[in-house]
């Protein structure tokens, strides 16, 4: 009986796909209907069997995209399913979402990772157009338009809402590389702003790694204590927070390299505020050291390494000898 049920379900799915394909062929090939009214009706009746995709497809084919976005904003169609969002970015609506009032209202309601995806696609589209005209290494290529600075400022607002996977994608997207001359943002006038955002992204990523690893360490301590201790424990037992360690040695080393080597390419106070906010005192110390602000650097190192006294004493002795 189970096999028969699976066959029925598969048949129903196939029928729905065939019906959807037939519907899209009809709206693309038939001109004997009002496209504006069709788009309006489909959005008014959401959710429909075909979702938002039908309205977006009709609007794209009949040059009604701006009216479609306005109708969506008026109808407050802000809770987009993944498939609806996929339709939105696959049917050339990205520019309208980023450059119109109605589109902006929908855009700012999207989850952080979808806002990033849309901005990433807009920049990729611009670069693709450039590549069709000139080779990637051509000196005649235009820099990224300064207008993209508004996108950078939007990304600043969503950094704290991205998870580790999306933060890694954002860091790769912004990555200025070790050589500033190879940055995709070279000559745009946005290099400093992009570098600030790149470092803030790495700092946030390191913070999330620390939180994750600290939780795992605390859980391991509890498990080990439970194995060594009687089942009943005093409710007033002292609780000790897990020691702070470097969440990811490789990630921290990469962050500190940029902080140290590119000190003249970012706003130190802006990034320093982020470092302290995320409790990355090693990163803050690097910034202070690069500015020769050694008392503040020592304080940050103590915050970070207070539990490893031999290392701290060795480091303090080295810095004090340099100061004297």
Image: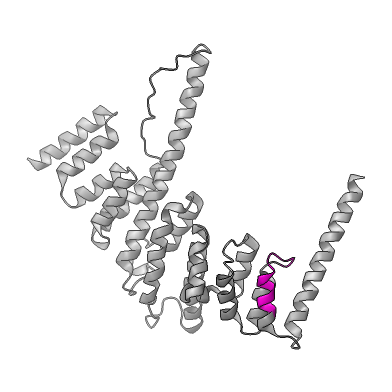
Q: Nearest the camera: 202 or 69? A: 69
**Total numbered badges shown on the rendered structure:** 0
The residue sitting at 52% across, 16% down in the picture is 227
Percent x, y of residue 298:
19, 39
Percent x, y of residue 80:
60, 62
| Residue 23 falls in image quadrant | bottom right
Q: Quadrant of the C terminus?
A: top left
The residue sitting at 78% across, 72% down in the picture is 21
Here the colouring is one colour
Percent x, y of residue 258:
31, 55
Image side of residue 317 versus residue 208, left or right: left
Q: Nearest the camera: 309 or 302? A: 302
Magenta stretch in the rendered image: 38-50
Q: Quadrant of the N terminus?
A: top right
Q: Residue furthest bottom?
A: 32
The residue sitting at 64% across, 79% down in the picture is 59
Q: Residue furthest left?
A: 324
Q: Nearest the camera: 163 or 124? A: 163
Image side of residue 15 versus residue 246, left or right: right
């Amino acid at each position: 009986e189970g096999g028969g049920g699976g066959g029925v379900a598969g048949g129903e799915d196939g029928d729905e796909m065939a019906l959807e394909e037939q519907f899209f062929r009809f709206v693309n090939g038939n001109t004997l209907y009002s496209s504006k009214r069709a788009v309006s009706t489909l959005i008014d009746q959401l959710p429909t069997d075909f979702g938002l995709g039908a309205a977006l497809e009709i609007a794209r084919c009949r040059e009604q995209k701006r009216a479609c976005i306005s109708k969506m904003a008026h109808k407050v169609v802000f809770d987009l399913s993944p498939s609806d969002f996929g339709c939105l970015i696959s049917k050339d609506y990205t520019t309208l979402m980023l450059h119109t009032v109605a589109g902006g209202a929908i855009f700012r309601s999207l989850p952080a990772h979808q806002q990033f995806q849309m901005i990433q696609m807009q920049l990729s589209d611009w670069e693709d157009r450039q590549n069709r005209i000139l080779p990637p290494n051509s000196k005649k290529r235009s820099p990224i338009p300064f207008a993209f600075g508004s996108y950078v400022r939007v990304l600043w607002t969503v950094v704290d809402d991205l998870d580790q996977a999306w933060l890694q994608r954002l860091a790769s997207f912004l990555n200025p590389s070790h050589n500033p001359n190879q940055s995709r943002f070279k000559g745009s006038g946005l290099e400093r702003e992009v570098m600030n955002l790149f470092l803030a992204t790495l700092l946030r990523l390191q913070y999330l790694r620390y939180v994750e690893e600290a939780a795992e360490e605390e859980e391991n301590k509890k498990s080990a204590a439970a194995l060594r201790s009687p089942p009943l424990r005093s409710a007033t037992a002292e609780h000790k927070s897990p020691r702070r360690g470097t969440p990811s040695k490789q990630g921290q080393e990469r962050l500190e390299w940029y902080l140290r080597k590119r000190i003249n390419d970012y706003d130190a106070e802006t990034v320093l505020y982020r470092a302290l906010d995320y409790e990355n005192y090693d990163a803050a110390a690097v910034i202070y050291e690069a500015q020769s602000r050694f008392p503040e650097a020592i304080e940050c190192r103590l915050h970070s390494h207070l539990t490893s006294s031999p290392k701290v004493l060795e480091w303090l002795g080295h810095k004090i000898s340099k100061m004297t």
